[in-house]
Image: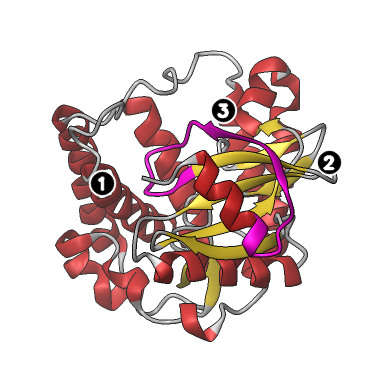
Amino acid sequence: MLTDEALREAIRAAGGGIAVDVWPLSGGLGAAALWRVVLSDGRACVARAFAEGAAGPAERERLAMAAAREEGVRVPSVQAEFEVGGCPVLLIDLVPGHTVLDAIRRRPADAARLGRSMGEQLARLHGGVAPSALTDEGWLTLGGDALAPLVALLRRLPDPDRLLHLDFHPLNVLADGEVTGVIDWANARSGPPFLDVARSQAIIHAARVAGVLPAASPGPDPVDELMRGLRDGHAATFGDDPRPDLSRAWALAMTVADVGGHVGSPGSPFTAEVVARLARDRDAAIARAIATGT
């Protein structure tokens, strides 16, 4: 187990500075553990520690963040990278602000504007080709066997070499009046741009089915406004999705495969019943995409 003292020593040995304060942060459902670190020069960072032997995922995140920054996406910089007891660690800048979800809970009127800014950041990301180390056809298999009937249609989608985030939701985007940073690049890889937008929508849908987010309200709903803004911000660069049915089917399939791995995990809101409901939605979306496909 990675201790605070071992982390302090590793940061010093890697040339990252002297850590005067180190304390753990609560993470999401992913495999990385997080610590907030304050260095002796006053800089605040986050240490993102991966599982033992997980050098590949750590390098994937580093490469994705570097490529995204080159496209003008607001991404934290990596200050140091090292291993502690076989666990790869990235020491990255602490992004100022709160999660976008917290921001729109405090000020619902900001939802559409922040959503559009999110969409613009995502469009910047999609303007760049993925690094060669992240470019493959892995995106075709992220939804498992359920996507088999759609593979031929999916292969026709344009720009499959673009860099995607694939976990772009209001807990992984931070804001302080405006978007200040995009975090958690564990899923980054190449793929067609509109799949990333559809994946964001599928994550919100899954969160509502699981009760993490409340169901949409009859009146103006901040989360709906946020997602509408995201689509508009992305469309300002890429236009409307020419195959929304296909994108939605793919995104739901990936999301079912993703959250299905968290059933029974401590603190996970994704029960077998929730995953079964999402699987039904996925199957209906796949049937619709087949029916409308050419």
- Residue 26, how many percent across, how many down? 48, 31
Disc 1, disc 2: CB below 8 Å? no
Question: Which residues fall within the magenta stretch?
Answer: 12-33
* Direction from residue 269 to residue 194 in the image, left or right: right
Which of 182/255 is in front? 182
* Three-letter amino acid code at the position of disc 1: Val
* Between marks 1 and 2 in the image, the one whose residue lies nearer the viewer: 2
Disc nearer the start of the sequence (3/2): 2
Disc 3, disc 1: CB below 8 Å? no
Displayed quadrant of residue 238: bottom right
Which structural element holds mark 1?
helix
Residue positioned most to the bottom: 132
Which of 124/29 is in front? 29
To which residue does mark 2 refer? 42
Give the quadrant of the N terminus: top left
Numbered label attached to residue 256: 1
To which residue does mark 3 refer? 223
The residue lying at 15 percent from left, 36 percent from top is: 276
- Residue 95, how many percent across, how many down? 72, 43
Judge whether residue 238 can be spotted in this image.
no
Using a 10 Å C-alpha cutoff, classify the residue at mark 1 as few (fewer than 14 neighbours), some (14 to 19) or many (20 or more).
Answer: many
Query: Is 166 in the magenta?
Result: no
